[in-house]
Amino acid sequence: MIRKMNKKILTLLLLFLCNFAHADHVIVSGGCSLNRWEHYRVAQDQHDKWWGNFIRGGTMRMDEIRKAYGPSVPIIWIVYRPAYEMRGREDGKNYVGMIDQQAAKRGATLVWVNTGSGLISALNARPRGSVKSFDYFGHSNKLCFCIDYGTEILAVSTQWLHERDLGKIRSSIFASNAYCKSWGCHTGESMSAVWKSKLGIPLEGARGKTDYRALASGQYPEVSGGWVR
């Protein structure tokens, strides 16, 4: 009886240590629009004049995670590459190289994706129970993360993670107490509820628009309505 109990305790301990060893913090940065499209907007609606809004949001979150959990905790940074390649060519800058440098500086594992299905695959590659936190920085509406918005076509998303596709994400990758947040516009108006229904954990999202201008003063994006789960 004692041997059986010891084996059971040992098994539980090994499972705990395995999960602890894979305490991943996942950050997704969607793409910026091209500058030439922004010129068609009135001044107050030009939200992607600076290429790095969603990159800076991600690096701020990495710095926060490093401060809270230390230098060795795994950070997985998933970035939509085509937008930064195209915006880099437009601006004459190597934004892909700059993003590589920011990941290396913070000891993050950088995962480039080119499609919405690629984002799902990148998430599903995480070990069971490993994802302790998830943050999305990028364009969105109440129904989806628009990982591309205004790169290929003015004010149009060509790659996304829609709420109807959330069931394709393995819910088992998330820890039972995982903290998930979308820093995009309107997520809390529909997608948050579907996320909870499909994946079993809350997704904090915005009711209303989010404003990334707060990044200039070292603050996270502000919301016009409120944050809901």
Image (cartoon, rainbow, N blue to C red):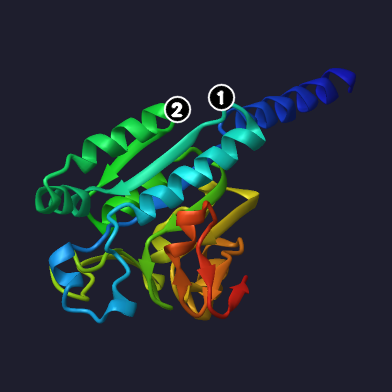
Q: Amino acid at mark 1?
A: Ser
Residue named by callout 1: 72
Q: Amino acid at mark 2?
A: Gly
Against 60, residue 98 (above or below) is: above
Displayed quadrant of residue 104: top left
Residue 130 in view (yes/no): no
User: Residue 210, percent across and down?
Assistant: 47, 71
Against 129, residue 52 (above or below) is: below
Q: Residue at point 43% right, 78% down?
A: 142
**Label 1, residues with CA under 10 Å away: few <14, some 14-19, many ≥20:** few
Against 208, residue 217 (above or below) is: above
Residue named by callout 2: 107
User: Residue 226, percent across and down?
Assistant: 60, 76
In-front residue for pair 124/192:
192
Mark 2 to mark 1 CA distance (whole Å)? 8 Å
Q: Residue at point 66% right, 30% down?
A: 15
Q: Decide if residue 41 is on the left or right side of residue 59.
A: left
Q: Decide if residue 33 is on the left or right side of residue 199.
A: left
Q: Decide if residue 178 is on the left or right side of residue 153.
A: right
In-front residue for pair 127/88:
88
Q: Residue at point 32% right, 52% down?
A: 52
User: Residue 113, percent across and down?
Assistant: 26, 47
Residue 10 in view (yes/no): yes
User: Residue 118, percent across and down?
Assistant: 27, 51
Circles 2 and 1, Cβ within 8 Å, touching? The answer is yes
In-front residue for pair 53/39:
39
Helix or strand or loop: what does disc 1 sit on? Answer: loop
| Quarter of the rendering occupied by the N terminus | top right
In-front residue for pair 194/55:
55
Q: Earlier in the sequence, mark 2 or mark 1?
A: 1
Displayed quadrant of residue 161: bottom left
**Label 2, residues with CA under 10 Å away: few <14, some 14-19, many ≥20:** some
